[in-house]
Image (cartoon, helix red, strand yellow):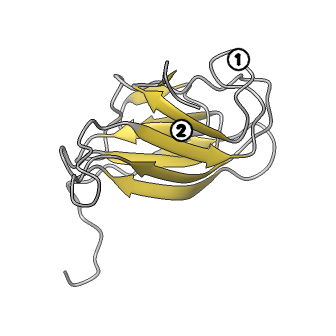
Amino acid sequence: SDGTKDSTFVSPTLTLASGTASINSIYIQIFDSKILIGGKWDSLTAGATTLASKNFARLNTDGSIDKTLVSRFDPSENCDVFKITCRDDGSKYNFVDGKIFIGGNWAKYDGKNFPRFNRINNGTYGSTAE
């Protein structure tokens, strides 16, 4: 806790074709300590792995990419993820299902018209979400 970089953590590199890539939101999942990141990018690289996962991804505790969650944003859409949260702590509402909620400025997710706010399951739109 002296403020130096943790040498065991692989920080991801973000790529954006036009403009500056950014991470706008970070959420640590309590039940597995994986790291959800949201922002604006076309692809990200951690170590030797590159993932074309636009604007949203999950990292393992060492910073490597968790390939089990893949963003479903349309590659042609110019959008950002501004907020991420997860029902994973069980402390207030007793939800420990790991559902992920994302908010931002998009029109479509997973090929469907679901603008600005979604609940997702491992990268796909939640079938009962609004």
Residue at image location 18% in from the left, 46% down from the top: 31
* Residue placed under numbered mark 1 in the picture: 112
Residue at image location 53% in from the left, 38% down from the top: 56
Residue at image location 70% in from the left, 28% down from the top: 114
Q: Quadrant of the N terminus?
A: bottom left
> Looking at this rendering, what residue extends furthest in the front direction?
93
Q: Quadrant of the C terminus?
A: top right
The x and y percentages for residue 87 are 34, 46
Instruction: Tell which of 105 and 38 is nearer to you.
Output: 105
Residue depth check, mark 2 versus mark 1: number of the one nearer the observer: 1
Q: How far apart are marks 2 and 1 (CA)?
A: 17 Å
Is residue 118 placed above or below 30 in the rendered structure?
Answer: above
- Give the side of residue 118 with respect to residue 45, left or right: right
The x and y percentages for residue 64 are 31, 38
Residue at image location 48% in from the left, 24% down from the top: 126
Secondary structure under badge 2? strand
The residue type indicated by label 2 comes to Phe
Instruction: Tell which of 10 and 127 is nearer to you.
Output: 127
* Residue placed under numbered mark 2 in the picture: 56
- Give the side of residue 73 with respect to residue 85, left or right: right
The x and y percentages for residue 66 are 33, 31
Q: Quadrant of residue 118?
A: top right
- Give the side of residue 87 with respect to residue 55, left or right: left
Secondary structure under badge 1? loop
Mark 2 neighbour density, 10 Å: few (under 14) some (14–19) many (20 or more): many
